[in-house]
Amino acid sequence: MASPGQVIFWSIISIIIVLAGAIALIIGFGISAFSIPEVNVDYNASSESLRCEAPRWFPQPTVVWASQVDKGANFSEVSNTSFELNSENVTMKVVSVLYNVTTNNTYSCMIENNIAKATGDIKVTDSEIKRRSHLQLLNSKASLCVSSFSAIIWGLLPLCPHLMLK
């Protein structure tokens, strides 16, 4: 049976291992946030517009609009993007408005930083609106760090009871 001192010692060692893993995750993955955008018709605007909103991003992403009909078109002059700091003062809300859109076309709002790329698509016709969204992680280093940390913890956990009994 382990003495109270041994139990305390190995409990402290376990906490140190978990904290070291958490620090490794932060260093490998970085402090980051990303969310899937929602694209809607902006009925408040004076012309036909689309509004793309994503509630949480960090670090600050880039936003690019694309069109299925006007492939390769540069929409930077007919769009307006803003980044609003959220209440926790770390992440930001992304809002981008695309002006002068036409019906019977599919538009994509692509939000991307060094961690993730998220796309919100909207097709507006005279009779319906169809939406689709997807998210892609870009940082493979983050995935490697998470799996390495998990492997270390699962490798050390079986040793703890054995070490406490000595």
Image (tube, helix red, strand yellow):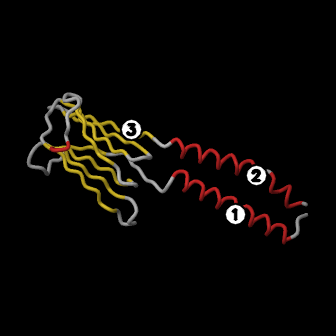
* Cα distance in 3D space between marks 1 and 2: 12 Å
Mark 1 against mark 3, which lies toward the viewer? Answer: 1
Quarter of the figure with the N terminus: bottom right
* Cα distance in 3D space between marks 3 and 2: 37 Å
Name the residue at 89% across, 60% down: 165
Image-based side of 149 in relation to 118, left or right: right
Query: Badge 3 local density, few (<14 within 10 Å), some, or many (20+)?
Result: few
Image-based side of 18 in relation to 10, left or right: left
Please state which amino acid type lies under the numbered disc 2.
Leu
Mark 3 against mark 2, which lies toward the viewer? Answer: 2
Quadrant for residue 22, please give it.
bottom right
Q: Look at mark 3 in the image and give the residue it sits on.
A: 134
Please state which amino acid type lies under the numbered disc 3.
His
User: Which SS class for mark 3?
Assistant: strand
Name the residue at 15% across, 38% down: 101
Query: Badge 1 local density, few (<14 within 10 Å), some, or many (20+)?
Result: few
User: Which SS class for mark 2?
Assistant: helix
Q: Look at mark 2 in the image and give the residue it sits on.
A: 156
Mark 1 or mark 3: whose residue is earlier in sequence: 1
Residue 68 is situated, as x and y percent measured from the top left of the image, at 23, 29
Rendered view: 58 above or below 129: below
- Residue 15: numbered disc: 1
Rendered view: 127 above or below 146: above
Q: Nearer the viewer, residue 29 or 134?
A: 29
Q: Nearer the viewer, residue 132 or 156?
A: 156
Quadrant for residue 38, please give it.
top left
Residue 13 is situated, as x and y percent measured from the top left of the image, at 75, 63
Residue 127 is situated, as x and y percent measured from the top left of the image, at 17, 31
Image-based side of 25 in relation to 111, left or right: right
Q: Nearer the viewer, residue 123 or 100?
A: 100
Residue 139 is situated, as x and y percent measured from the top left of the image, at 49, 43
Mark 3 or mark 2: whose residue is earlier in sequence: 3
